[in-house]
């Protein structure tokens, strides 16, 4: 039997490579709420089965409030547990702004529901352009 002498690293062409899975939803229709408690944002829910890996969750929403100085709150929820929240304060009635949220979580293996919820403190909140993306990071 001979010996193999190396300098550096030994690699195999069959070495494990990183893999990801992703899912996203996007909507442009205008939705309104007057709720002062969290309600589901229409069309912004993803069901995904993951391993016990980190998951990147990102969202962006164009929102407005009919009342100057009124707040619009947007939350990311994983299995109905709030994981991140952002807010927009309307400088003038119905002038839109953008809420963008990103967060990385390590989830347990299994099926999960990831969704956006929203509410206002006063007035009527509106959302139109919105997206939710979930990326499982396998490595």
Image (cartoon, rainbow, N blue to C red):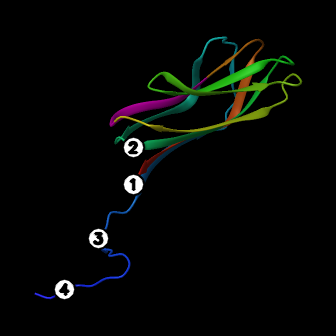
The CA span between labels 4 and 3 is: 22 Å
The CA span between labels 1 and 3 is: 15 Å
Dots 3, 2 in contact, CB < 8 A: no
Return the residue found at the far right.
Answer: 92
Residue bearing mark 2: 53
The CA span between labels 4 and 2 is: 39 Å
Q: Which residues are magenta?
A: 109-117
In the figure, 14 relative to 33: above or below? Answer: below
- Residue 99 rendering spot, x and y as whole percentages: 71, 34
In the image, what residue occupies the spot 37% across and 63% down?
17
Residue bearing mark 4: 3
Question: In this rendering, which labeled residue sits more in front, label 4 or label 2?
Answer: 4
Label 4 Cα neighbours within 10 Å, binned few <14 / some 14-19 / many ≥20:
few
Is residue 50 left or right of 29 when viewed as pictured?
left
What label does residue 107 carry, if any?
none
Whether residue 55 appears in this view of the structure is yes
Closer to the N terminus: mark 4 or mark 1? 4
Residue bearing mark 1: 139
Whether residue 131 appears in this view of the structure is no
Closer to the N terminus: mark 4 or mark 2? 4
Q: Secondary structure at mark 2?
A: loop
Question: In this rendering, which labeled residue sits more in front, label 4 or label 3?
Answer: 4
Is residue 69 left or right of 82 when viewed as pictured?
right
Quadrant of the image occupied by residue 32 = top right
The quadrant of the image that shows the C terminus is bottom left
Closer to the N terminus: mark 4 or mark 3? 4
- Residue 42 rendering spot, x and y as whole percentages: 58, 27
Residue bearing mark 3: 14
């Amino acid at each position: 039997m001979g010996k193999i002498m190396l300098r550096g690293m030994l690699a195999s062409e069959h070495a494990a490579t990183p893999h990801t899975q992703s899912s996203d939803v996007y909507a442009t229709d205008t939705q309104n709420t007057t709720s002062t408690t969290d309600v589901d944002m229409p069309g912004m829910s993803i069901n995904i089965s993951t391993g016990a890996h980190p998951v990147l969750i990102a969202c962006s929403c164009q929102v407005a409030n009919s009342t100057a100085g009124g707040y619009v709150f947007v939350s990311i929820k994983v299995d109905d547990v709030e994981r991140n929240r952002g807010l927009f304060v309307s400088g003038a009635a119905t002038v839109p702004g953008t809420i963008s949220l990103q967060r990385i979580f390590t989830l347990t293996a299994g099926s999960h529901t990831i969704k956006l919820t929203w509410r206002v403190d006063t007035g009527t909140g509106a959302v139109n352009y919105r997206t939710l993306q979930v990326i499982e990071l396998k490595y």
